[in-house]
C-alpha cells in the first residue's frame, strides 16, 4: 500500500501561524483506510460521549474515540478520556504520518461525522497536557468538509484586529499539519453543512506530555 506522500503547500498566517495542507494519500488507499476504521474504531458512549461547557453537560454533535500509547489520558471539554490501545489501521496511519512529517505522536482523537449535520464548534487545541512545541497532524477521510480558522483577536465584541478567516476544504485522504503557534493565535471549527450527506472520519494526532499519564 502507498505511504502518505507530501505534495502540498505551506501557508503562513498572521503571528507566525503556519499550516501545511498536504495531499496525502491516493483515493484507493483513502477508501481502504476509511473502511478499515469503520470496522475497528470503538466510539465513546455514555458520560464519555458528552462535553461540559460553562458547567453544563451536552451531547457531542458527532462521535468520538481516543487511542494512543498505554495509560495516556486526555482531558477534552471538561471530560477525561483514557486512550485505548492503537488499532492496526490507526497504527499504520500514525507510522505514515510520522514518516511524512518527521514528527512523533503518541495519541489520536478520532471524530466521526455521520453527515453534514454533525459538526465541531470553534475552539483551540490548547489543553495543558499537549506538548506545546509539537504540531497537530489532522488526517481526513470521507466527505470533504469546510474547516475554518479564525484569529483570536477578531472574536467577540472586543475584537481588536481585522484579519480575514481562513477557509480550507479538507478532502478525502488529506493531511493538515497545524504547526505551533497556530493553536495559540487561531481558533478552528468544522461548521455544519446540511448539503453533505456522506460520513467523514477525522484523526488528529497529538503529543501528550508523559507526566499526564494516570
Ligand atoms: O474534524 C475536524 O477536521 C476537526 C477536528 C478538530 O478540530 C479537533 O480534533 O480539534
Image: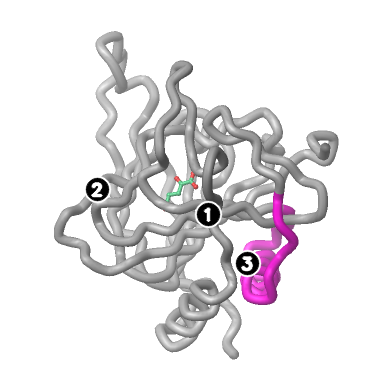
> Which numbered circle lies on residue 29?
none
| Residue 93 in picture, x, y percent from top left | 62, 71
Circle 2 Cα neighbour tier, 10 Å, few/some/many (<14 / 14–19 / ≥20)? some
Q: Are marks 2 and 3 in contact (CB under 8 Å)?
A: no
Residue at x 71% of width, y 56% of height: 84
Of residues 201 and 204, which is closer to you in this image? 201
For the C terminus, which image quadrant? top right
Circle 3 Cα neighbour tier, 10 Å, few/some/many (<14 / 14–19 / ≥20)? many
Q: Secondary structure at mark 1?
A: strand
Can residue 118 be seen in the rendering of this structure?
yes
Q: Is residue 145 magenta?
A: no
For the N terminus, which image quadrant? bottom right
Distance between mark 2 and mark 1 Cα atoms: 22 Å
The mark nearer the N terminus, 2 or 3, is 3
Circle 1 Cα neighbour tier, 10 Å, few/some/many (<14 / 14–19 / ≥20)? many
> Which numbered circle lies on residue 192?
2
Residue at x 27% of width, y 45% of height: 191
Distance between mark 2 and mark 3 Cα atoms: 27 Å
Q: Which residue is mark 3?
A: 97
Amino acid at each position: 500500500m502507498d505511504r502518505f506522500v507530501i505534495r502540498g503547500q505551506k501557508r503562513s498566517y498572521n503571528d507566525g501561524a503556519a499550516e501545511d495542507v498536504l495531499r496525502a494519500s491516493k483515493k484507493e488507499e483513502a477508501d481502504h483506510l476509511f473502511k478499515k476504521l469503520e470496522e475497528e474504531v470503538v466510539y465513546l458512549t455514555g458520560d464519555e460521549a458528552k462535553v461540559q461547557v460553562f458547567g453544563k453537560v451536552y451531547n457531542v454533535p458527532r462521535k468520538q474515540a481516543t487511542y494512543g500509547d498505554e495509560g495516556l489520558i486526555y482531558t477534552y471539554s471538561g471530560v477525561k478520556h483514557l486512550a485505548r490501545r492503537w488499532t492496526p489501521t490507526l497504527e499504520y496511519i500514525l507510522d505514515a504520518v510520522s514518516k511524512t512529517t518527521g514528527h512523533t505522536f503518541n495519541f489520536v482523537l478520532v471524530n466521526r461525522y455521520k453527515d453534514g449535520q454533525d459538526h465541531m464548534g470553534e475552539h483551540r487545541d490548547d489543553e495543558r497536557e499537549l506538548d506545546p512545541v509539537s504540531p497537530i497532524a489532522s488526517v481526513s477521510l470521507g466527505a470533504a468538509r469546510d474547516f475554518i480558522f479564525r484569529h483570536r483577536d477578531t472574536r467577540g465584541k472586543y475584537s481588536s484586529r481585522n484579519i480575514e478567516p481562513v477557509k480550507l476544504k479538507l478532502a478525502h485522504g488529506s493531511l493538515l499539519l497545524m504547526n505551533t503557534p497556530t493553536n495559540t493565535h487561531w481558533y478552528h471549527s468544522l461548521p455544519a453543512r446540511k448539503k453533505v450527506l456522506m460520513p467523514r472520519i477525522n484523526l488528529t494526532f497529538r503529543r501528550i506530555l508523559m507526566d499526564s499519564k494516570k
